[in-house]
Amino acid sequence: MILYEILGLLLFVTVCIVLMAGFPVGFTLGGVSIAFAVIGALFGVFDLSFMGFVSNRIFGVMTNEVLIAVPLFVFMGVMLERSKVAEELLDAMGAAFGNLPGGLGISVCVVGALLAASTGIVGATVVTMGLLSLPTMLNRGYDPKLATGAICASGTLGQIIPPSIVLVVLGDQISNAYQDAQRQMGNFAPDPVSVGDLFAGALIPGLMLVGLYILFIIVRAIISPSDAPPVPRDALAGDGGESVAARALRALVAPIVLIVAVLGSILAGVATPTEAAAVGAVGATFLGGLRAPGTRGMPIYVAAACLVLVLVLTGFVDLRLGREQVSSSEQIGIYLAAAACVGLIWGLVAALRRIAADGTLREVSQATTRISAMVFGIVIGAQLFSLVFRGLHGDDIVHEFLVNLPGGAVGAMFAVMALMFLMGFFLDFIEIVFVVVPVVAPILLMMDLNPIWLGIMIAVNLQTSFLTPPFGFALFYLRGVAPPEVLTSHIYRGIIPFVLLQISMLGAIALWPELTLWLPRLIYGTVAGG
């Protein structure tokens, strides 16, 4: 084996080992890559002039508008978590489904799906449901393995149900890989792949996964009623005589409106994912302002109505200024939009003052900064890794290996999915996205695989990185808040059926790619890759 091939493989292996040792991801990617670049230069197999492209790559990250959605979605999720949305949803859904066999487990899955589509923060979702639902499920006689498995699996739905931070960063990586693959194949004007395409492609598989979770819980409750007993109706009565339907409606209004505003505006083509993330951040701020101590909620209600009005006008009226010809209806629309913006600012200022007064704004801003800094630190480190790996011809090694596998594209895809699944036992999803995807995705896409289908396959596979022992983050989150009588073995054993369900979903997507391509075609017409 040639020396640069040995160094390329050693670079990849060393990065994985250091990451598993617990060192910070961004520093690991950058530091190990620089060390191997120096070693390669000393042996004459790496050209240090490659390092001159680092600044250009970092500038490309800084000017990438898609990645602006990351801190905005993080802000939205953290703000909603502080607004106690999960608590209300769990209480209401538990009352709605609790009297059914497996009803509390079903309510956990439904709430997990709703939180996934409105917050997407896995840690906050798992911890919140663990604190609120797990004691109740155990007190009502639920098997600890079933209860912990349902909570962990439902808490990770934010990785696949849009809007998802995973889909944002993965969409950016798949888009870059598709452009590279098409250029190498001689197509210098390929159809673009957007984050919106992945959002649309992930919606049906995500909802089907929720359905599989619920079906499993129902079947388990039928086969073994003692594992998931129903809760007596009188134990579910709300305070003040409020009906179950009224409680459910009150709890569902806020997240449903936010989901429609964010995800609906993306799928309808009214807003890009970045613009929709801004809408979600503003909407979450309104909700936080309403939940904060204060006497006047009218400015926030007015501002929320103005936000909806702006979205509607954007979808149906051309609001661009500076045009030579503007019809009377467009002029009215522009005036209405301007007035709505004034009302929006009024309510936003009122909401910010209220959440700043009780310290929520400070906490949310700090959490958003920490998470966003971690993500973009990893992005910069990944740029260094990718550059050095390519400089050591590592991409050529991977290309040769995948192309020569038996089975062609099927064999290569199976090998990559197996590798990602195994890496998910030890590494976080974001590490896999920035280390593995840039290396293998261009090669797979050159085998005539659809980029949207490939992206969703990777996303569903990466979801297992939060669930698979020994280092599944969702398992650690739940272990940290679980009562002492819940053993770690309960959590590990309880998650096994749900991991198998995810693998089944992965197989279904592989067999029927239309599960991921039908909705993007319906919404956007033709999509990249056919």
Image: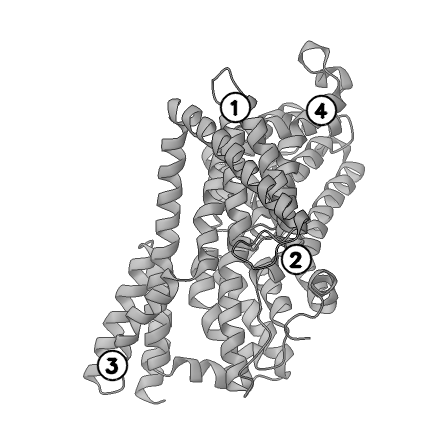
Q: Amino acid at mark 2?
A: Ala
Quarter of the C terminus within the rendering: bottom right
Camera-nearest label, 4 or 2 = 2
Residue 7 in the image, given as x and y percentages of width and height: 31, 79
Q: Amino acid at mark 3?
A: Ser
Q: Taking 121 as reference, is 220 left or right?
A: right
* Callout 3–callout 2 Cβ contact below 8 Å: no
Numbered mark located on residue 95 in the image: 4
The residues tagged by marks 3 and 1 sit, at their Cα atoms, a distance apart of 55 Å
Q: Amino acid at mark 1?
A: Arg
* Callout 4–callout 2 Cβ contact below 8 Å: no
The residues tagged by marks 4 and 2 sit, at their Cα atoms, a distance apart of 32 Å
Q: Taking 79 as reference, is 525 left or right?
A: right
In this rendering, does residue 527 appear at all? yes
Precedes in sequence: disc 3 or disc 2: 3
Residue 206 in the image, given as x and y percentages of width and height: 66, 52
Give the labeled residue for mark 2: 200
* Callout 3–callout 1 Cβ contact below 8 Å: no
Name the residue rendered at 50%, 73% in the picture: 177
Give the camera-side residue of 119 and 524: 524
The residues tagged by marks 4 and 1 sit, at their Cα atoms, a distance apart of 22 Å
Hey, which residue is sitting farthest left in the picture?
Answer: 42
Numbered mark located on residue 291 in the image: 1
Crowd around label 3: few <14 · some 14–19 · many ≥20 (10 Å): few
